Image (tube, helix red, strand yellow):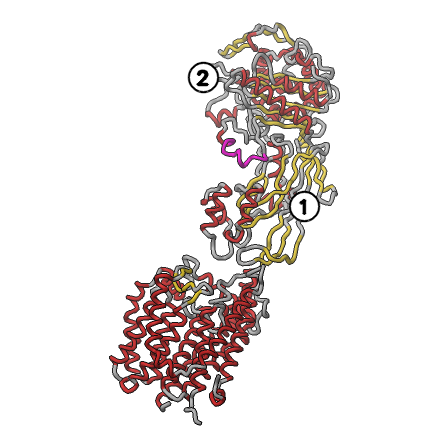
Amino acid sequence: MDKKMLKRTRLFISIVVFIFIVLSARLAYLQIIQYEHYWGRAEKNRLRILPITAPRGEIFDKNGRQLVTNRPGFTVSLVDLGRGYDQETISYLAELLEMEEEEIRAKNYSQFYRRYLPIRLKTDVSMETVSRIAERRMELPGVLIEVQPIRNFVFGNFASHILGYMGEGTVPDWLKEQWKKAGYEYQLGDLVGQAGIEMAWEPFLRGEDGGLQVEVNSTGQAIREFERVEPKPGDDIYLTIDARLQQVLEQALNEVVEGLLNENNRYAGEAAAVVLDPRSGGILAMASIPSYDPNTFRLDFPVLVKDPRRPLVNKAIEEHYPIGSTFKMVTAMAALQERAVSKGERVSCSGTVTRYGATKSCFQGTAHGALNIFEALQKSCNIFFYEMGLRVGIDTLAHYSREFGFGNPVGLTDIFGEKKGIVASREFKSTLYRDPWYPAETMDAAIGQSFHSITPLQLANYVAMIANVGIHYRPYLVQKIVDSEGSTKMIAEPEVLYFMEAEESNWEIIRQSMSLVTLPGGTGARLADFPIRVAGKTGTAQVVGRDGSIPSHSLFVAFAPLEEPELALAVFIKHGESRGSTSILVARKILEEYFRVPEE
Amino acid sequence: MFDRRLLKNFDYQLLLIMLVLCCYGLLVIGSATQGANISDPFLFLRKQAVWIALGMVAIFVIISIDYVNFYRWCWYIYAGNLVFLSAVLFVGREGGGAYRWLDLKVFDFQPSELAKVIIIITLARLLVDYEDKLKSFFISFSFLLYVAVPMALIFLQPDLGTSLVFIIIFFGMLFIAGVPWKNLLIFLCSGLALFPFLWTRLLPYQKMRLIVFLNPELDPLNFGYQLKQSMIAIGSGGVTGKGLFEGTQARLQFIPAQHTDFIFSVLGEELGFLGAVVLFLLYLFLIYRILKIGSFSKDSFGAFICTGIAAMIIFQILVNVGMTLSIMPVTGLPLPFMSYGGNSMLVNMLSVGIVINVGMRRHKIQF
């Protein structure tokens, strides 16, 4: 080899050495200087904490009958493996799960800040779906199948407005705040109660999720388990509801409503009723028609939201209606308390009356003759109460309406959404119409028409107040809470929100009058043969339609037994007046069930 | 079979260092393929061992033929090479969008691997034949055309990485042969000037790899994923590594092509900086021995061959390791003696055999 070649060979070797120095330097930079960084990233690659959903607390009725429980179900989740989502996987899942690709992307995007955690795409998928995914596991990076408890509403479409339903929908800020105070910090995408008890008692029901630290491979499949933190099951809730009574109530309401629809009453279809224990305010039954099945809520949702009868609305607390003659005890109490009438005074009814230029009549123009206050309530004489209304004036009527809990929420907080309704008053009219109040309107207000608008719950509370001589208990649904270890965390105590002062004798007059209603000659004589003395009051709330032929709302309120009341109820059937009161039929079913009286 | 005097010059050190490298490779392949095939966990290891054994046979066959004969057979070899490389374009087996293999039933033959050794041998003859005219620019230019024909055929497969190896072999051998700096620089500059034209001939995925290499953040199609995972694997290995079979990136299959192109990432993760430096030292020693044998060879033909082989090996190391460290673009060149794969193993071992051949016959045999 010549000298030049040798020289160049040496240069060649130098270049080779130089290459190894460069590679070593780069290697040292990655492995020594950046070691911590890359070590952390490798750990993040392989370690993942999979949440273990805590079994949700169960819901029981007052007698310990299971209403809501859990069953195992399969959930399909998708996890970001750090390289975004594979288009083929998303297309495949969209087809298999019958979802829109956009929907899947939106779900992933909405949970961007908790990437690398599995994102639930679809809960409770079929076994067939599970096996189809399992077969193609290697081609579906990041797709996981988890077993998770699925909410099971044992009786399906039953007490759904009380129990509520589960979902991943948006949660309002005030509720997030409230949940946070109760110890549960909501995160976007959490499966939570979206109505009823499920929603209001979310922090108690949900328990604490556990976690499982696993090692995953590059396709996100768990290879090894490390630490496991067991979830803490949620608390069980016992309601004040009596499931049997609830069932009878719902069935009775449904039958009545169906009957009305079969009569081609195109206005009918909605109804609500509340049954309270007047001794505590505990709600024994509460129904709103139409309702829905919380188990299939997600599937039914598109139909439910389009239904003009609005099945999702709990009409017992979220809607208020004119209550007609069931209001008359308010007018009677106002007149008696203000000494505008004595218990013996008679007012003559000739069927119609003209005062302040307005001619008004009794129901169906009946002339009742001379009536005292007992008979006036028994027969629901409008003429008598027009007179009483005019004697005390609208301001006093409005005052006593509020005394009985109208115009304000009556205090149900165990589920959300209670409305305050409207009390007919000067102030209300002037803010709404900027018009003065006319005495003729006082007459309407005295018999429960005019602007009065009352929720069925308010109506039941009002009857309960008559039954228990003026005590306004806070209505409640949750009787007790028992944690997963079986110890009782909370027992509801009756809470007196207000005590309405009135003379004992006046209460007695009203109670006696109401007991006459259900005797022969009274408007509720259909209950005359009922073996237990029931105090009641019918109501027929007229609805002014353009053609005037709209059926009136049918109402009935009652408490029983007369002497020592155990239950107070209010039934409202929208446009339910048809050859007499339909609501009294429902009331009778409730009374029969509660007092174990065989059917007539 | 061999004259005892020939055996006297047999470079056992080179053979030994090569075998150490092969065993080192087997060790890492064993780790990289654990769990890859449940029914036969040693499948890859066994196959690779068979290739190494075949490589040993190839070495002993090749050293029994005096390398001077290669000089004589040069043109047949060159022509045969072109036939194979052309055949691959027409009847080749497709894999990953490229046509690189001829299906020989027993195994898939990759002519471009063998082409590297062939071009080294035939270019060495040209350099010897024109040794006194090497200052002429046109002579050098005609050498370039000579290399460019097989290179173009490989580029068409397409196999950018192997094409580049040809360029390095060309420069390395011309440099050692004494071609003036000036001429080499002219080739280099005109090559760079041709780059824009070449760019338009690249396939989208090749362009993407280059773009991602230049800007790893710009990663619209996740071409950077494998680079990122490779760097995480290496970086997390630290000084001493996580231990053989203990690399999480490797064991959980986060590294793509971890037993072939990215075998170095597995080594870096499991054996750390020290394990990598040991590998570098083995390589350095290997290349040093090859060049040393070249410098002692009895003729320029042997010296040129050795230089070409050294250039081939160092370039593949640079590109492969550089790729896993994200300082070189992803080109898919295997790491010599380490990566799983029969063709490259066989050809690399054959190359070492040729070098040993040159070393054995460094002195005229005296009777």
Please give the label number shown on residue A233: 1
Q: In x, y percent, where is residue A358?
A: 50, 12
Is residue A17 something one can see in this rendering? no
Residues at marks 2 and 1, CA–CA distance in whole angstroms = 56 Å
Q: In x, y percent, where is residue B25?
A: 52, 72
Q: Does the magenta stretch include residue A300?
A: yes
* Location of residue A422 by image quarter: top right
Is residue A303 something one can see in this rendering? yes
Residue B298 in the image: above or below residue A438: below
Q: Nearer the viewer, mark 2 or mark 1?
A: 1
Judged from the image, the secondary structure of the residue bearing numbered disc 1 is: loop
**Callout 2: residue from which chain?**
A
**Range covered by the magenta-colored residues:** A294-304
Judged from the image, the secondary structure of the residue bearing numbered disc 2 is: loop
Q: In x, y percent, where is residue A246?
A: 66, 27
Please give the label number shown on residue A546: 2
The quadrant in which the N terminus of chain A is found is bottom left
Residue B95 in the image: above or below residue B10: above
Q: In x, y percent, where is residue A90?
A: 47, 48
Please give the label number shown on residue B87: none
Residue type for callout 2: Arg
